[in-house]
Amino acid sequence: MSVETLSPDPIADIDELRRLKELVIIMDNSKPGEFPPSIDPLLEGSQGLKRLVSAMTILFTDYGGTVPAVTCDLIDEEFGDRYDEFDYDQVLALCKDIQESEIPAQSAVYQQMFEDFNKQCFAGRLPNYKILVVYDIWHWETERLGYPWFDPPACEAGGFIDFAGRQIFLRFLADHIFGWTMAEFLIHEMAHAATDGAHDANWQTEMLRLKALGAPVRDDDIYDI
């Protein structure tokens, strides 16, 4: 089976999500080329390759960003012997597909979370926003939505709100980044939906209100204007 015939979505169910998170944690706590034997069952076959591409895309994004060619080259360097049945172009195509993809199973989870937060914290007054969980927010913001190209976001950027399209994008985190969770990024963007796109006094007032309600608001999001 060639890589191109596989869906780029490696997170089809809860068990697969658990395996991916396990792989990310192992790799994040290991030196390159010194991965423990416990990693081997997670890398087997076509699904293992998809899992590896996803894990490396997540980790490299957490640490400053990547592009498909870089991810592919490092997989070829570290794991090339394991995936001899796939040629370089196939793996590169998979790296591109995954980095630029949405994760539907996770989007559904956070769509429900948006609706719950809207009822509990906003009295249902926010308009309907479509929630998309993606690997690379920068790709969706610029290439997919056509927003102007500026400097790439800092590696901790985890959310983006598209007011015109009524969409909120969340970067998939296998665990958390710098102490942030995806729920906290979602509330951050929902506060923008209730105000505007600025981190101004109105937004801060909204964040303080949400924190008082017990919503997942980070202390980092509360500051003097």
Image (cartoon, rainbow, N blue to C red):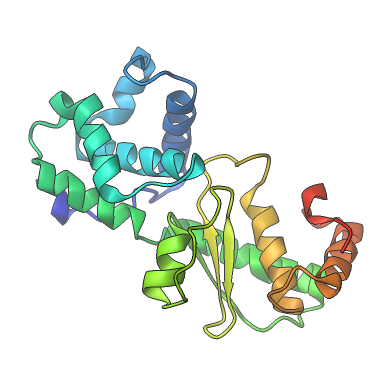
Camera-nearest residue between 172 and 5:
172
Specify whether residue 8 is in view. Answer: no
Relative placement, left or right, of 186 versus 208 is left
Quarter of image, res 34:
top left
Compared to residue 181, the image places residue 114 above or below, namely: below
Relative placement, left or right, of 19 versus 183 is left
Q: Quadrant of the C terminus?
A: bottom right
Quarter of image, res 205:
bottom right
Camera-nearest residue between 42 and 52:
52
Specify whether residue 149 is in view. Answer: yes
**Position of residue 99 measured from the top left corner of the image (x, y, whole percent):** 35, 54
Residue shown at the point (10%, 39%) measured from the top left: 86
> What is the tally of numbered marks visible in this picture?
0
**Position of residue 16 measured from the top left corner of the image (x, y, whole percent):** 40, 41
**Position of residue 126 measured from the top left corner of the image (x, y, whole percent):** 72, 80
Residue shown at the point (24%, 29%) measured from the top left: 44
Relative placement, left or right, of 120 versus 74 is right
Compared to residue 157, the image places residue 168 above or below, namely: below
> What residue occupies the far front of the structure in this picture?
151
**Position of residue 165 measured from the top left corner of the image (x, y, whole percent):** 52, 83
Quarter of image, res 206:
bottom right
Residue shown at the point (27%, 33%) measured from the top left: 74
Residue shown at the point (38%, 73%) measured from the top left: 144
Relative placement, left or right, of 8 versus 123 is left
